Image (spheres, rainbow, N blue to C red):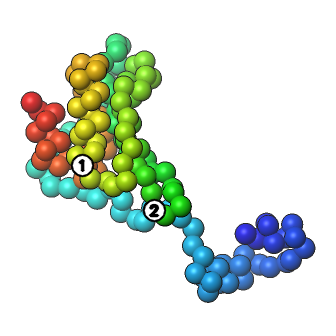
Amino acid sequence: MQSMLRDNGILASYERVRRLMRKAGIYAIYPKKNLSKLGAVKYIHPYLLRDLEITRVHQVWEIDITYIPMASGFMYLTAIIDVYSRYIVGWGLSNSLEANHSLDVVKKAIEVHGKPEILNSDQGIQFICKAYVDYLKD
């Protein structure tokens, strides 16, 4: 905002621009803190990739969720990538961070490509809920 004002011949300090934007109710769009809260300890598993040499396709898949800002809120993109080949084996869009959306992406990827030896993720609440962990154990 400060750069745009300067380009239009208006000089204003960063602090002034910030104060006026707050007063006008103008805020940046970004996810709030604690987007990935730690879940129940009984579903947390050890990190299996330490010192592991990844030598073939479907040995290790990685899954993660990122957000896409929209005009009113966010869409959440869940993606699964094969670490060895860097091939996207599954993805899905959702308007919420519920675990069942991530689980659906995993189910579709396994249905199409077969199951990996390891499915690695962070330990966000979507990836350590009971339904998700039970499905992967089965």
Q: Is any part of residue 58 visible from this angle? A: yes
Residue 29 vertical position relative to residue 57 in the rendered view, above or below: below
Q: Nearer the viewer, residue 44 or 51?
A: 44
Identity of the residue drawn at 40% across and 49% down: 76
Residue 122: numbered disc: none
Q: Nearer the viewer, mark 1 or mark 2?
A: 2
Q: Nearer the viewer, residue 100 or 124?
A: 100
> Helix, strand, or loop for circle 1?
helix
Q: Residue furthest bottom?
A: 23
Q: Amino acid at mark 2?
A: Gly
| Residue at the spot of label 1 | 99
Q: Image quadrant for the N terminus?
A: bottom right
User: How crowded is the residue under tag 2: few (<14 C-alpha within 10 Å), some, or many (20+)?
Assistant: few
Reading the image, the residue beneath label 2 is 73
User: Where in the figure is residue 132, as x and y percent of width and height?
Assistant: 17, 42
- Residue 5, x across and y down, in percent: 81, 72
Q: Is residue 50 visible?
A: no
The answer to whether 114 is drawn above or below residue 72 in the figure is above
The C terminus: image quadrant: top left
